[in-house]
Amino acid sequence: MFLQVIQRIAIILVLASFLVTACGQAPASQPTPEPTPLTVIVSTSIVADVVRQIGGERVRVETIVPVGADGHNYEPLPQDLARLNAAQVIFTVGAGYEEFIERLIASSGTQAEVIALSEGLNLRVLAKEEASIHSHADEHGDTHADEHGDTHADEHGDTHVDEHGDTHADEHGDTHADEHGDTHADEHGDTHADEHGDTHADEHAHGAGAIDGHTWTDPNNVKVWANLIASTLSRIDPAGADMYTTRAADYQRQLDELDRWIAEQVATIPPERRLIVADHIIFGYMADRYGLRQIGAIIPGVSTSATPSAQELAALQDLIANYDVKVIFVGDIANQQLAEQIARDTGVKIVPVLTESLTDENGPGATYIDYMRYNVQQIVAALRG
């Protein structure tokens, strides 16, 4: 009996010791919940990729203009309004590129901050040589009178936007459209046709004096985008600031490498062949950076929204003959039939490029860097011959 009592006491002591130990243990640690991603709305697939490169898993990016569509003249859908309302921040190219975006944002009533990535960049203004294919400066930089008796600035006579966004008279005393590219009615509120019967409602909106919004065609501009994206995300999500800054710096190093590679590739083109004719004026920033010369386009302006006249198409054919142009660079969203007609009439070759959009993940331009490499390879191979 005594032995049984001792055994029971021993069992009770062991159990008590176990309970004390168990009660003294710290509760099992719970995994730290992942932060809820920021809801970021962007205008185009190009902007979307750059934001993802910097935001990583801390952002959820939704794109308004789908892959393969045109950022100039996209027609918003009803669901775009709802998406804008859910956004914490909205990134756009800016510089007038998205012709639909201001009215879409206004209609949505969103309270999200809107960041135009091209703000602060040195924006280029479309030169007359690029926008008008009726007359071009010759290799000596002389100016020529066109059929109406007007003279045009040579390749060094471009106008530029000053720090206030205004454009100024060029060396011939001509004035150009304001920062919005608008023309204005006279004191009676009337607009007028010129002596040839043409109206010019959008002559400056898309032609000479228009601001070129295709800022991403120079990767150095996208480096500026990266800084603005990182600083904006850091302000909204301070906990991720270090990550955003680090990712932006890593991405900028990739852009520096891209910049060096493009310069090396363009240097292999004979100087006399560094002439670009495309479906519209898109490669201006690239041309300025790397020593190319953009001399004309099927649509002589920065937007795909315009339609070339028969006179403009005839002048383009003359330009192709005069400059001995061998290729036209045509984007996948361009009017292919019009490009094919010009190719048949002039004997030039159509070379495909990417313009307003990236491709899907299986295409040659799934990321911005892929997009740029593809275009440079296409341009260099075609011009080098």
Image (tube, rainbow, N blue to C red):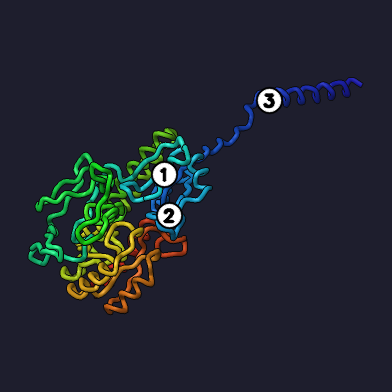
Q: Is residue 90 visible?
A: yes
Viewer-proximal residue among 120 and 190: 190
Three-letter code, disc 1? Arg
Viewer-proximal residue among 239 and 124: 124
Sort mark 2 into few (<14), some (14-19) or many (20+) by Cα contacts within 10 Å: some
Q: Residue at x 25, y 52 (%)?
A: 192
Q: Earlier in the sequence, mark 3 or mark 2?
A: 3
Sort mark 3 into few (<14), some (14-19) or many (20+) by Cα contacts within 10 Å: few
Q: Residue at x 21, y 67 (%)?
A: 275
CA gap, disc 3 and disc 1: 67 Å
In the rendered image, which quarter contains the N terminus?
top right
The residue carrying mark 1 is 103
Where residue 202 sits in the image (x, y, percent)? 29, 54
CA gap, disc 3 and disc 2: 68 Å
Q: Is residue 205 above or below residue 359?
A: above
Q: Is residue 260 visible?
A: no
Q: Earlier in the sequence, mark 3 or mark 1?
A: 3
Q: Residue furthest front?
A: 188
The residue carrying mark 3 is 21
Q: Is residue 382 above or below residue 137?
A: below
CA gap, disc 1 and disc 2: 12 Å
